Image (cartoon, rainbow, N blue to C red):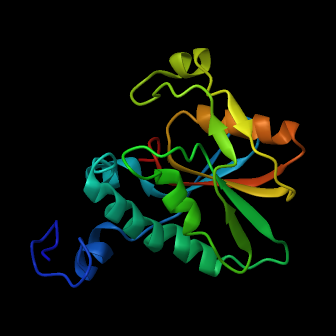
């Protein structure tokens, strides 16, 4: 198949190794939410916007899987600690035949991180895309937790914009006596 970016032939991947190195080498960006929880993102939104535009297409699954391997999987393999963590994807409801958060969450499977799926689901499925913080606050996600016994949690989402979704998820988790170690997102809209 041909690379989507340079159109050179690529074995088994939609983006060749050279373009992966040029355009998809992750960095680590940090933001602290008002509640003190840190969010680590691997890309700036502007740098991967063209890849994210595939989100609701058949190609999106392959692109998200590739980005998950390059960032989340690499992070998990380098994350060494004495503690064991579980990772929870935010609202892993299937849209467009797959869940973006589930792909990212699954890539965290490692010696120290065990992904759990479909444990934190939104009851209000209103889209936040392109909406203001005021709109997001007026239309909370109304998260529900399916019971699980572990308490050390890493929250996973694809994009952080205002931080409203993560903050709502953290609040619900803390009410269930879950300790949020930190959050991981694929990209941060505010990082420039």
Q: Is residue 98 above or below residue 28?
A: above
Q: Is residue 17 above or below residue 58?
A: below
- Residue occupying the far right of the picture: 177
**Pick the front one: 50 or 110:** 110
Quadrant of the drawing holding the N terminus: bottom left
**Pick the front one: 125 or 72:** 125
- Residue occupying the far bottom of the picture: 11
Q: Is residue 89 left or right of residue 150?
A: left
**Pick the front one: 121 or 32:** 121
User: Residue sitting at 62 percent across and 74 percent down?
Assistant: 76
Q: Is residue 168 left or right of residue 132?
A: right
Q: Is residue 170 left or right of residue 77?
A: right
Residue 58 placement (x, y as % from top left): 27, 55
Residue 154 placement (x, y as % from top left): 71, 57
Q: Which of the 4 image quadrants contains residue 173?
A: top right
User: Residue sitting at 64 percent across and 39 percent down?
Assistant: 121
User: Residue sitting at 49 percent across and 69 percent down?
Assistant: 71
**Pick the front one: 21 or 168:** 168
Q: Is residue 170 above or below residue 40?
A: above
């Amino acid at each position: 198949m041909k690379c989507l970016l340079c159109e050179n032939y690529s074995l088994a991947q939609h983006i060749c190794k050279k373009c992966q190195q040029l355009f998809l080498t992750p960095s680590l960006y940090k933001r602290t939410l008002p509640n003190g929880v840190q969010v680590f993102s691997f890309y700036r939104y502007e740098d991967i916007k063209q890849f994210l535009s595939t989100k609701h297409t058949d190609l999106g699954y392959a692109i998200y899987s590739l980005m998950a391997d390059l960032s989340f999987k690499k992070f998990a393999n380098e994350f060494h600690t004495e503690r064991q963590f579980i990772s929870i994807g935010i609202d892993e409801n299937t849209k467009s035949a797959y869940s973006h958060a589930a792909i990212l969450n699954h890539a965290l499977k490692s010696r120290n991180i065990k992904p759990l799926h479909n444990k934190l689901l939104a009851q209000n499925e209103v889209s936040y895309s392109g909406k203001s913080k005021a709109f997001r606050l007026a239309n909370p996600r109304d998260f529900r937790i399916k019971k699980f016994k572990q308490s050390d949690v890493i929250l996973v989402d694809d994009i952080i914009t205002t931080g409203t979704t993560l903050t709502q998820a953290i609040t619900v988790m803390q009410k269930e006596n879950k300790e949020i170690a930190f959050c991981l997102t694929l990209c941060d809209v505010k990082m420039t």
